Amino acid sequence: MDGINKAEMRERLGNLEKIRDIIVGSKLREYDTRFTKIESDLSMWQQEIRDRVEQIKTTLSKEMAAAVDSLEKKISTLSLTAAEE
């Protein structure tokens, strides 16, 4: 290792980390904060969409059940009318 022992290598790497943190640390923290906010917003929107889809499914199921019931009544009425003729 060109005369560098493990302790010296760790110290140099630690210094590199400090330099990196000084140069780009604030930007990295800013990006991390922004990504966390975006992740939170997406999670919230995802839940809102799930809730809305569930509402739509419930409404659609009720409307379909009502339409089927109405059609069954019409068919029954037509069957009775046809039977009377």
Image: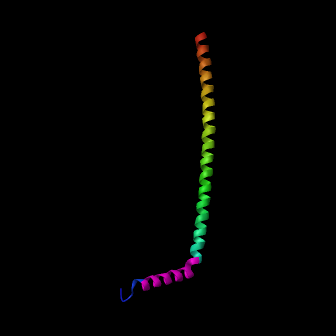
The residue sitting at the front extreme is 7
Query: Is 21 drawn above or below residue 36 in the view shown?
Result: below
The extreme top residue here reads 85
Nearer the observer, 26 or 64: 26
* Residue 36, x across and y down, in percent: 59, 64
Q: Is residue 62 visible?
A: yes
* Residue 27, above or below 62: below
For the point 43% across and 86% down, which residue is it? Answer: 8
Residue 83, image x and y in percent? Answer: 58, 11
Farthest-out residue, bottom: 3
Determine the image quadrant of residue 37. bottom right
Above or below, 24 against 47 in this view is below
Q: Is residue 77 above or below residue 55?
A: above
| Secondary structure predominantly adopted by residues drawn in magenta | helix
Q: In the rendering, at what x and y percent does residue 31 appear?
A: 58, 71
In which quadrant is the N terminus drawn? Answer: bottom left
Residues drawn in magenta: 7-25
State which quadrant residue 44 falls in: bottom right
Q: In this view, does 71 lie to the left or right of 1?
A: right
Quarter of the figure with the C terminus: top right
The residue lying at 47 percent from left, 84 percent from top is: 11
Point 59% across, 58% down: residue? 42
Residue 20 falls within the magenta-colored stretch: yes
Decide if residue 85 is in sight here: no
